[in-house]
Image (cartoon, rainbow, N blue to C red):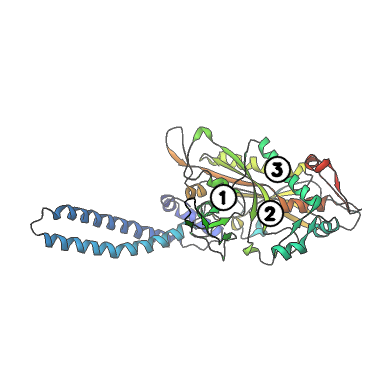
Amino acid sequence: MLDIKFIRENKKALKKAIEDKGLKLDLENLLDLDEKRVEMIQEIEELQAKRNKINDEIATATDKQKVIAEGKKIKDKIGKLEPEYKEIKRQFDELMVQVPTIPAPDVPKGKSEDDNVEIDRWGEIPEFDFEVKNHIEIGRDLDILDLEKGAKVGGYRGYYLKNEGVSLVMATMMYAVNKMIEKGFGPMIPPTLVKEFALFGSGYFKGVEYDGEVDEIYQVATSEKDADGSTDKEKKFLVGTAEPSLLAYYADEVLKEEDLPIRTCGYSQCYRSEIGSYGKDTKGMYRVHEFMKVEQIVVSKADIDESDKLQQEMVNISREMHEELGLPYRILQICTGDMGTGKYKMFDLEAWMPGLDRWGETGSASNFLDWQARRLNVKYVDKDGNKKFAYLLNNTALPSPRIFVAILENYQQADGSVKIPEVLQKWMPGGFKEIKKK
């Protein structure tokens, strides 16, 4: 969410951002609604002041009935204006949450993922002297993945990890958490069941409220009991990443500039309805409803150059992990039309997946500037004593399913076994170095 004053002063640039991001937003309508909103607030406040004055005058008035009648007229007028104002405010709020962050000048212009730009690549795409299997076949042959039973019990996109598959995935998570700690990111295991404000604040709702038709979030239907035994009817949701929980930790806080940047990472289970991905990657573990992930976030002071450096710092950590895991990867700079509404700049990492014969996204780093901070009310006091909204950034450290896919497919051997990347071996039970057929 942006400041309405900024929107008015940067109307031309914002109209260009709306066009470049492929959004359907009538900015002029928003600004007209704002004018009406402000006028109605002023009118209501003036009427309330008159009503208060009349209330004070009643006791000493010579003609009390006349004063009371005047007060009733004002009360009736306020009663008529307030619903009108609420409707104007509702329309205004719905449009305000759709106003995008203006993309960085170096963001490629484009309409879809087809227009993203590859800016770097590392490692050689492996060549095999045997018939390559995909992770589904490897997982079945090694008895470490069961998709059939997963679908039976968990439904579409369900899966069971088994035996050494469990050890491999947990090893990647331990490796990622420890890498984050080494890089100065404070670790957390955050809530995965959260209130509405955390998801709205971080931008995971398209509008003001949750819409199950478009938001790829699971809402929990069951109510719960508060400490006093009363029923808590507040809506609760399952997070799709630790990002909303980590960012909401700082909601309504006023931080100190000298404490910034704050680097935090979170390990969590993640849940995604994948509504917008209907029909895509319907087999295997590439796109699933629940998985584990290590996420990193940064709370930065309001300085674009510093936030750019911090974003690159996070991307470089992801680079380092992919290289230590021995996974060929490329980096894409995401174009305007493939970026979210609130994003200023975005990079994706994609690992090569031989069994799928394509690149697959294994990381994503985004800089939102103050778009999320305004929604979550995350501020800091600068050295001059001024309160400012912080800049918020996030990046995937490692997602469990896609790294699992990439390791199985890149490290498969002719005899059907899979080697364990050296950097993960210390996290494997007994330090074993490969997964063999039973």
Q: Earlier in the sequence, mark 1 or mark 3?
A: 3
Query: At numbered mark 1, what does the secondary structure look like: helix, strand or loop?
Result: helix
Instruction: Say which quarter of the image contains residue 141.
Output: bottom right
Instruction: Say which quarter of the image contains residue 199.
Output: bottom right
Mark 3 lies on residue: 176
Task: Identify the amino acid type marked 3.
Answer: Ala
**Label at residue 291:** 2
Label 1 – label 3 distance at C-alpha: 19 Å
Q: Residue at x 76, y 60 (%)?
A: 284
Is residue 154 visible in the rendered image? The answer is yes
Mark 1 crowdedness (10 Å alpha carbons): few <14, some 14-19, many ≥20: many
Rendered location of residue 235, percent (x, y): 51, 58
Mark 1 lies on residue: 244
Q: Nearer the viewer, residue 378 or 188?
A: 188
Task: Identify the amino acid type marked 2.
Answer: Phe
Task: Identify the amino acid type marked 1.
Answer: Pro
Rendered location of residue 106, percent (x, y): 60, 48
Figure check: 19 above or below 320: below
Choose mark 2 or mark 1, whichever is in front. 2
Report if the CB atoms under discs 1 and 3 are less than 8 Å apart. no
Query: At numbered mark 3, what does the secondary structure look like: helix, strand or loop?
Result: helix
Image side of residue 425 versus residue 179, left or right: right
Mark 2 crowdedness (10 Å alpha carbons): few <14, some 14-19, many ≥20: some
